[in-house]
Amino acid sequence: MPLGLGRRKKAPLVENEEAGPGGGAPGGGGLPGAGSGGPPGLPPPPAALRPRLVFHTQLAHGSPTGRIEGFGNVRELYGRIADAFRLPADQILFCTLNTHKVDMDKLLGGQIGLEDFIFAHVRGQRKEVQVLKTEDALGLTITDNGAGYAFIKRIKEGSVIAHMPLVSVGDVIEAIDGHSLLGCRHYEVARLLKELPRGRAFTLHLTEPRKAFDMISTRSAGRPGAGTQLGSGRGTLRLRSGGPATLEDLPSAFEEKAVEKVDDLLESYMGIRDSELAATMVELGKDRANPDELAEALDSRLGDFAFPDEFVFDVWGAIGDAKAGRY
């Protein structure tokens, strides 16, 4: 579903192996259009070739500690967690790293540090909220879990939604006026909300994450003995939409800052935050000589987003500023 924000529109994004008939909701498993790590049309390498790393996990509202391994994307990760705690995988809304709190700065995206402790936030109370769109912007920033759920990552202070105490960061947006949004990507949900006319009243159908017990404390980034898995443990497991997960070095200071700046631009232009999408854009743009080259690369890889010209120019400038150390 194109955003309709710009001049360009190319072929649909490449779907991952979970999408399509019988494959679950579209858009799951990570960034759409991400490479599979192998030639087009060939199946991913067998699971036996994936890095065999063991991670520890808990349910954020309280549970014993479980051990999971052998996953290559977000859907598989949720499946392993669900198996460990004997619950349906669709009960998991999102995961945070090293804290049980609904902390969007610790949200699990497309990569996990080798020493990270994973907390899974599961379905809690459902609620319906009547909203009157008195302003063009509702003040919501949307992200998604890579497995079919789009949820609220930020609420702008003083906005329409900020005056509604029933709406909280972490709430999954399941439907608008009864129209299901399960399986939609975050940019699709953001577009639908943006296109609602000013003065329109509508109903948000939300599900909040189950509340955590007070006795659970926030985890630090490390745990005893974790570094013995692979050398010093300084690295990340990057989850793929197709093919195996890969072990990578920690990003450089330039890459971290560039991703942060591009993620800010995504929020400003599109009302979404997606660090993995931002990381892909930085990777595509860091060696481009000018905005036109970046626009061609984005069209080829991410054409379904239809990024407007001014956005592409700002992204190219942000990457250049970060590369030059202008933070």
Image: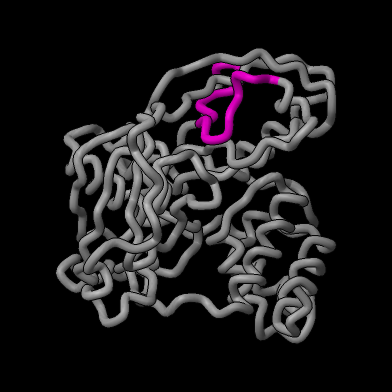
The quadrant of the picture occupied by the C terminus is: bottom right
Is residue 317 rendered to the left or right of residue 84?
Answer: right
Relative to 275, is 19 above or below?
A: above
Observer able to see residue 40? no
Tell me where residue 111 appears, x and y as whole percent.
42, 63
Q: Residue at x 46, y 18 (%)?
A: 126
Relative to 80, is 40 above or below?
A: below
Observer able to see residue 48? yes
Relative to 209, is 280 above or below?
A: below
Q: Residue at x 28, y 52 (%)?
A: 76
Tell me where residue 25 appears, x and y as whole percent.
40, 40
Give, as a single range, the part of the protein colored magenta. Answer: 164-178
Is residue 308 rendered to the left or right of residue 140?
Answer: right
Tell me where residue 95 appears, x and y as whole percent.
40, 46
The quadrant of the picture occupied by the N terminus is: top right
Q: Nearer the viewer, residue 205 or 171?
A: 171
Magenta stretch: helix, strand or loop mostly: loop
Is residue 268 rendered to the left or right of residue 15?
Answer: right
Residue 137 lies in quadrant: top right
Is residue 153 rendered to the left or right of residue 4?
Answer: left
Q: Nearer the viewer, residue 106 or 74?
A: 106
Relative to 54, is 19 above or below?
A: above
Based on the picture, tell me whether residue 248 belongs to the magenta stretch. no
